[in-house]
Amino acid sequence: MLRKIAIRVERELRDGLPVVASGIREYYRRERESVADMFEYLRWRGDISFAEKRLSEIDSIILSMMVYVDFDALGLCGEEYLCNLAKDYCLDNEYKSVKLGLIIPSKKINRLFCTAARCRRFGNVKVSDYVSRTSEEEVCQFAAATYHLPGKRMAVTFRGTDDTIVGWREDFCMSYVDEIPAQKMAREYLLAVAEKYPDEKIYLTGHSKGGNLSLYAAMKATSEVKARIVKVYCHDGPGLSYSNVTSPEFAEIRRKVAVYLPQSSVVGTMFERGDKYAVVKSSAVGAVQHDPFSWELDGPVFIRLSSLSERGKKNEEQFRAKMRQMTADEKREFVELFFSIVSATGAKTLSDFSGKGVKNVALLLKNYTGLEKHQRDLIVTLMIKLFDLKKEKTK
């Protein structure tokens, strides 16, 4: 059986890696064909302040992507207007890359920050309370910032998973623990800024794991803070546990929650999210759809599709079905095993793992002869999903 799995992995790697490259090339080809995106939105609405038009779903994803920027490197201390932070940083238009790994071609993040900070809509927004922490010992990756909008409103924004293996390991711990370290920090962060700025209404937003953190922090907030929440945005983030989604705490915020998934979502179909979500059209193929720069817009809203693609439905069905078959102890054992395989390659990031370690996965699996069949199958499935090694059509 291990030999069959090894052959399958080798075949997927051999046949699939060119598909990843071709998928990204197709994404950029389509992008050149004047598809409306966040930059087009800024050209259209950038001269209109938040006092004139309040925060839209497109504004929320722009803020979610800007929190990937290292505000410490920009010299943020206390509160500062975005236009002032960008004044020196964006002079030469040489935008540094933000390392987010394989499934988010991220050269545009700093460009987005500079473009937004130069326009009236975002330039006059203040940012404060930036925190960032990553710890391999504690299996934790967390970052957040708060944007202050006119009309006594603030957008509490959580960063998604970066390229670090520890960040992804923490994400998978959601499958068997009630509260991962980043969720605890998000809950505490929201309560702290809500107390610090008691007169401001609250939006919460985030992309990828940041979306999960926005859901979790809102759900765990006090009744007083929940009453101040206007909207909770989750952009292709992994969901919550079944017990959380069906809890009275989540019921209190359900009507304020807005979840967005691209049509062939991988990350956003993990775990539970309730029955309320919108499918947005992406110009990308496969796992690259996780990159919001591929999401298509129509004015202040995303272009909607009626349902997930067949691949998106299959992603959802496969992951949840396998996870529901496992006990909490089995999930813990699986996650520890899966990331011990990854760690054995010496990789610290997903990019390292893909570039150097993936070719050894078939050999590494042979060291775990005691695995149950469903565990081996799930490991191979996750390898394929994370690195988009299966050809699929965009629907």
Image (cartoon, helix red, strand yellow):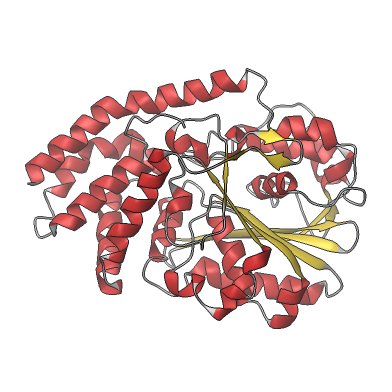
Residue nearer the viewer, 181 or 395: 395
What residue is rendered at 42% in x and 60% in y?
A: 271
Q: Is residue 232 left or right of residue 197?
A: left
Q: Position of residue 31 (x, y in %)?
A: 60, 23
Which quadrant of the view contains residue 183? bottom right
Q: Position of residue 179 (x, y in %)?
A: 47, 73
* Number of numbered discs visible in the structure rendering: 0
Q: Position of residue 269 (x, y in %)?
A: 44, 52
Q: Position of residue 275 (x, y in %)?
A: 52, 60
Residue nearer the viewer, 8 or 36: 36
Whether residue 157 is visible:
no
Whether residue 286 is visible:
yes
In the depicted structure, whether residue 394 falls above or below residue 167: above
Residue nearer the viewer, 342 or 122: 122
Which quadrant of the view contains residue 319? bottom left
Q: Is residue 358 left or right of residue 280?
A: left
In the depicted structure, whether residue 71 falls above or below residue 132: above
What residue is rendered at 76% in x and 49% in y?
A: 56
Q: Is residue 46 left or right of residue 132?
A: right
What residue is rendered at 43% in x and 34% in y?
A: 286
